[in-house]
């Protein structure tokens, strides 16, 4: 799909009932306990959706998630049924007429009841973790070793959960907060699965010259009771990817995500981080698209247009 086609598709409507519209994803009822999750090209910063979209971003998020879930076969159960437009139309024929609005940027998934905890795993002290550590020497309320510097690798990955806010910022909570919300057995299961998936991601990323600094996972309960990995997985929107050959502890790191947008906004003194947001220059939009396409190419070993959709059990 070309950049112009991508932008046109953003304006078209999917021929299903809209259940939820988030900052990036629109979720539709696909019937038979299934959902269609459409990843738009919208981009947000400081919880504000910016005026310009990032062409092909939704495709990268969707197809990279499919690639990761394919690599996780036998490791974790997940909600994904298909990202292949032909398969999706075969399973939900009513989507044929609105195919241009969702093709290549959509996941057909099992309907689940989400666990309202974001399962964050951090292998390096960076971002909000670095800010907390500088202030209190802790991460999610748990003490860390003294003397760490920005972007330093932690002695061992840390499970750093957060409440999943419907509006505003998510709030970091200690592990005991997950136990209070989900019970001890499920809290331990969420932490165990999160570490397992993170270690898998670290291994594959390292083979490709990339550091997976941190990431977040979401889980949900299927109607049959299974705990499933849901939503996007190990994408540049949910993870911090650093080029290994540019890694230098003691400073912020170049990042294969929306860093050009953050850098542009950080330099503005006229915006108070509240709506309405400023326009993004064309050069920032192009560079951000290039970052998303680069992480896709480096992880999968293929260009986005040449990617073959994995097949999953229906």
Image: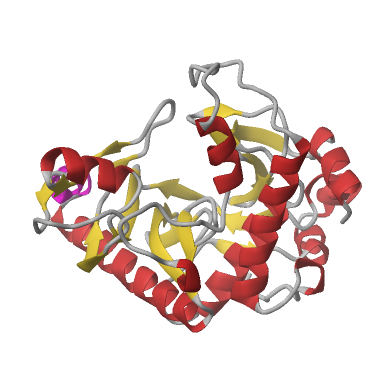
Figure label count:
0
Q: Of residues 171 and 73, which is closer to you in this image?
A: 171
Taking the spot 61% from the left edge, 32% from the top edge, the residue there is: 21
Quadrant placement of the C terminus: bottom right
For residue 114, say whether it is visible: yes
Q: Of residues 3 and 97, which is closer to you in this image?
A: 3
Could you tell whether 164 is left or right of 45 in the image? Answer: left
Taking the spot 83% from the left edge, 40% from the top edge, the residue there is: 7
Q: Vertical placement of 171 versus 297: above or below? A: above
Q: Vertical placement of 277 versus 184: above or below? A: above
Type of secondary structure dominating the magenta stretch: helix
Residue 86, percent from left and from top: 83, 65
For residue 54, say whether it is visible: no
Residue 276 inside the magenta-drawn segment: no
Highlighted magenta segment, given as a residue range: 173-182
Residue 57, percent from left and from top: 69, 50
Residue 258, percent from left and from top: 58, 47
Could you tell whether 3 is left or right of 120 in the image? Answer: right
Taking the spot 33% from the left edge, 64% from the top edge, the residue there is: 194
Q: Of residues 149 and 226, which is closer to you in this image?
A: 149
Residue 178 inside the magenta-drawn segment: yes
Taking the spot 32% from the left edge, 62% from the top edge, the residue there is: 249
Quadrant placement of the N terminus: bottom right
Residue 154, quarter of the rendered image: bottom left
């Amino acid at each position: 799909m070309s950049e112009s086609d991508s932008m046109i598709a953003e304006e078209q409507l999917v021929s299903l009932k809209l259940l939820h519209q988030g900052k990036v994803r629109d979720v539709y009822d696909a019937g038979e306990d299934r959902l269609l999750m459409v990843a738009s090209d919208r981009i947000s910063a400081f919880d504000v959706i910016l005026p310009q979209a990032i062409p092909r971003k939704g495709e990268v998020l969707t197809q990279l998630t499919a690639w990761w879930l394919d690599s996780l076969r036998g490791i974790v159960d997940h909600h994904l049924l298909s990202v292949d437009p032909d398969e999706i139309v075969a399973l939900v024929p009513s989507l044929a007429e609105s195919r241009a609005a969702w093709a290549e940027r959509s996941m057909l998934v099992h309907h689940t009841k989400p666990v309202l905890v974001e399962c964050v795993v951090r292998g390096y002290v960076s971002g909000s973790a670095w800010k907390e550590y500088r202030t209190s020497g802790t991460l999610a309320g748990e003490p860390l070793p003294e003397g760490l510097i920005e972007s330093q690798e932690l002695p061992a990955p840390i499970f750093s959960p957060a409440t999943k806010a419907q509006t505003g910022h998510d709030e970091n909570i200690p592990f005991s907060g997950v136990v209070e919300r989900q019970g001890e057995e499920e809290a331990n299961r969420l932490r165990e699965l999160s570490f397992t998936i993170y270690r898998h991601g670290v291994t594959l990323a390292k083979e490709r010259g990339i550091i997976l600094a941190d990431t977040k996972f979401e889980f949900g309960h299927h109607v049959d009771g299974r705990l499933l990995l849901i939503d996007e997985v190990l994408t540049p929107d949910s993870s911090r990817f650093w080029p290994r050959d540019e890694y230098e502890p003691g400073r912020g790191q170049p990042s294969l995500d929306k860093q050009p947008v953050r850098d542009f906004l950080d330099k503005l003194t006229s915006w108070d981080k509240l709506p309405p947001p400023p326009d993004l220059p064309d050069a920032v939009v192009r560079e951000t698209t290039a970052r998303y396409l680069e992480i896709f190419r480096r992880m999968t070993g293929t260009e986005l247009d040449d990617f073959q959709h994995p097949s999953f059990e229906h």
